[in-house]
Image (tube, rainbow, N blue to C red):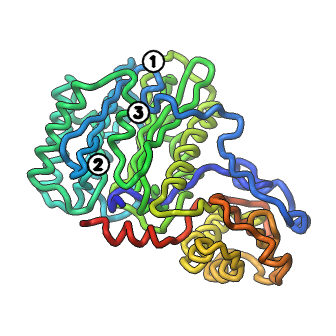
Amino acid sequence: MTDASKQDQTEPTLSPRTRPDGRSAGSASDRNRHEGAQADTDATAGQAVTAGQGVTAAAGFRAAGATAGLKASGTPDVALVVNDGPEAAVAAVFTSNRAQAHPVIWSRQVVGDGIARAVFLNSGGANCFTGAFGFQTTHMTAEAVAESLGIGAGDVVVCSTGLIGVGDQTFRDHVLHGVALTKDALSETGGPDAATAIMTTDTKAKQSEVTEDGWTVGGMAKGAGMLAPGLATMLVVITTDALLGSDELDQALRAATRVTFDRVDSDGCMSTNDTVVLMSSGASGVTPEVGDFQEALTAVCADLARQLQQDAEGASHDIAIHVVNAASEDDAVTVGRSVARNNLFKAAVFGNDPNWGRVLAAIGTTDAEFDPYAVDVSMNGIRVCHAGAPDRPSDEVDLTPRDTDVLIDLGVGPYAATILTNDLTHDYVHENSAYSS
C-alpha cells in the first residue's frame, strides 16, 4: 500500500434516477418503485472508453517508464510524460491532507501559472516527511528533467508515491538516475510503460482514453490502498490534444474529479501525495464545446476511478453505494460515505451477509436530513428494508458476485450521489500490516 497516494474520489456513476447535476429524476412519492431496482453504475455511458495508449493517446505527447532501482522487486519505478505540443496549458488538483509530501508542495507552485511541459513520477518512495533534504531532492529532480528537455524547472511537475519517510541519499540517486533513463526512452507510444512504472501495490496498470471528432483525452492512474476522498492514494496524469486554456482545464478537471475520484472511498484513509494533473498540447488544433470536453474528461476519470476501486488492496467485493432522493447532494455524499467507511458493513459484505441494519446504523451517525422510519434499502436489487422495517427476506439477496450494489432511498428530496468502496478482508489487513517491511 502506498502511504503517500490515496484519497477521496468516485466515478460519476449516476443512480437510476440521477441527473448530472446530482438531482434524482423521480420524486420521493414514487419510492416504492425502487424495489428490485439497481442504480446505473456505468458512468461512461455514451463514451467509447478504451485502455489504448493512455497518456500518449493524445497527439503531442511522449512518455516512458524505466527501472531506476527504487523497488527491491526490480520492477519499473520511474515515469516521464512530456508535452511537445504547441501549447502547454495545465491544471491540477492535489490532496487536501494538511500533511503534504514535498512533490505536492513543489507541484502546486508549478501549476500556479497554468503552464507545464513535463510530469516526472516515481514509485518506491513518497518523499514525504523527509526534511529539507527531501524538498531539495524534488527541486533537483525538476532541474534534471528541465535540463534534459531544454525547458525550465518551473514547468516540471513532480509526483512520488510509496512509503512515507523514504527519501534518503540512495532514493535521490535512484530518482536522478531515473530522469536520464526515462528521457532516453521517451516515445509517442510510451504510455503503457509509464502506467506500469507508477504502480505500487497495484496489480495492474490503469489506463483510459476517449477519442472524439478530431481530439482525444487519455490518462493513467495508480492507487490500490489508502484510497479515500480529497483525492483518492492516487497519482493520475491526463492528457489531451484539444486546444484549451488553463482556466478551461481547471474548471473541467475540478468538475470531473468532484464526481469521480473524490467519491472513491475504498478504505477511508487519505494520502499525503495524491495528485491529478491535466495537460493540453493543443496539437489537434480543435477547440471542442465545453460540454463535449467535460463529458469526455469525466468519462476518462470515471473509468480510471472504477479501475482504482477494482484493484483496491485485498478486496473481494466492489461496492457501489447509491443514495437517492436526498435533501441535497452533500447529504447524499455524506450518507454514502458513512456506509462506505463502516467496518461492520464492509465486514458483512466480505462474509456475503446482507446486513442492512448496519447500513441504517451508519446513516444514523450523519447530520443528513431523513426520517429513519421512512428509509428504503435495497441490496443487489432486493429491497430488504422498506420504511424503516424489514421487507424481503435477506436470504433472497445474493452477495457472492464481486459487484455489489446498495441502494439507499432517503425519500426527502431530489438529489443523489454514488460512492464506490470495497469490503474489509483478511488480505487487506495482511497487506497493510506488512507494507513497511
Amino acid beneath label 3: Pro
Amino acid beneath label 2: Ser
Q: Which quadrant holds residue 225?
A: bottom left
Mark 1 and mark 3 lie on one chain; the one further toward the N terminus is 3
Q: Which quadrant holds residue 361?
A: bottom right
Residue 327 visible in rendering: no
- Residue indicated by mark 3: 192
Q: Residues within 10 Å of mark 2 (few under 14, many from 20)?
A: many
Left or right position of 213 against 416: left
Residue 231, horizontal then vertical, whole percent: 45, 55
Residue 69 visible in rendering: yes
- Residue indicated by mark 1: 283
Mark 2 and mark 3 lie on one chain; the one further toward the N terminus is 2
- Residue 308 lies, with reference to residue 113, above or below; the image says below
Residue 206, horizontal then vertical, whole percent: 47, 42
- Residue 295 lies, with reference to residue 315, above or below; the image says above
Q: CA distance from mark 1 to mark 2?
A: 29 Å
Q: Residues within 10 Å of mark 3 (few under 14, many from 20)?
A: many
Residue at 23% x, 50% y: name it: 71
Left or right position of 373 against 197: right
Q: CA distance from mark 1 to mark 3?
A: 21 Å
Amino acid beneath label 1: Ala
Quick one: SS at disc 2? loop
Q: Residue 123 has which mark?
A: 2
Left or right position of 380 against 319: right
Residue 383, horizontal then vertical, whole percent: 82, 71
- Residue 153 lies, with reference to residue 372, above or below; the image says above
Query: Which residue is at the front of the view, 295 or 53?
Result: 53
Residue at 59% x, 32% y: name it: 293
